Amino acid sequence: MSHSCHDAQAEHYDARVARHLGDYIKENYFGVLDRVIDRAELSSGQSVLDIGVGTGLLSAKMDTGADLYGIDISGKMKAKARGKGLRLRLSYGDFLHVPFRDSSFDRIVSTFAFHHLRTEEKERGYHEMDRLLRPGGIIVIGDFMFENDGQRQDLVRKFESEGRTDMVEELDEEFFLDMSHDVPLLEQLGFRVARERLSTLSWVLTCAKQHPAR
């Protein structure tokens, strides 16, 4: 999705989230944010990056004394986050082009942004996050996912039976994470991955960097 699409959503994004919490896309939205923060095990003095920071809904919950950084491709989204007075340093960037040096962060978090990347871009994104993470660090991703293509097809049938053509189109147009493909990519990079389902579509992946065997 281009920055212009995100810019167009920025003004009313927070209100839309609150208004549609009962629908599939926003179902348990804030529960996902809370679980991401819990799994990140944040503490004072850590350096934390929020990728796809948007209007700052996740970062607003991370008042732990950590040093917070956020990147987004949308200037208007960042402006909304900045207007909330968050203790957060904002930069332009996305999963594929993060403007920081290697091993800059103890924790990397992201919610409801990764599904905008195509399959081949996701792999590059995992490598970029691995580059940025310090030894012993943790990556936590909360987003729309399915376990495998079989579960995706089950969801398509479910939405079709409910007359939710909008949700069928959402599955076709966006790039929800396929865990049968993505989790092995993360494991190949040396991560131990735990997965949790928080709603019909939303999951949380906690990726802890394993120390190499001696």
Image (cartoon, rainbow, N blue to C red):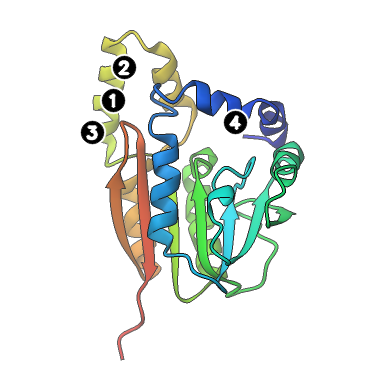
Does residue 90 appear left or right of residue 19 in this picture? right
Of the two numbered discs 4 and 1 in the rendering, the one whose residue sits closer to the viewer = 4
Circle 1 packing at 10 Å, graded few (<14), some (14-19), many (20+), is: some
Residue 178: x and y in percent read 35, 43
Distance from disc 4 to disc 3, alpha carbons, whole Å, reads 33 Å
Q: Which is more N-terminal, label 1 or label 4?
A: 4
- Residue 144 image-quadrant placement: top left
Mark 4: which secondary structure?
A: helix
- Residue 39 image-quadrant placement: bottom left
Residue at image position (49%, 69%) is 43
Say how many tags the image has.
Answer: 4
Q: Residue at the far bottom: name it.
A: 214
Q: State the quadrant of the N terminus.
A: top right
Mark 1: which secondary structure?
A: helix
Circle 2 packing at 10 Å, graded few (<14), some (14-19), many (20+), is: some
- Residue linked to disc 4: 14
Distance from disc 2 to disc 1, alpha carbons, whole Å, reads 6 Å
Question: Looking at the image, is 57 positioned above or below residue 201?
Answer: below
Q: Residue at the far top: name it.
A: 163
Of the two numbered discs 4 and 3 in the rendering, the one whose residue sits closer to the viewer = 4
Q: Which is more N-terminal, label 2 or label 3?
A: 3
- Residue linked to disc 1: 155
- Residue linked to disc 3: 150
Distance from disc 4 to disc 2, alpha carbons, whole Å, reads 25 Å
Distance from disc 3 to disc 1, alpha carbons, whole Å, reads 9 Å
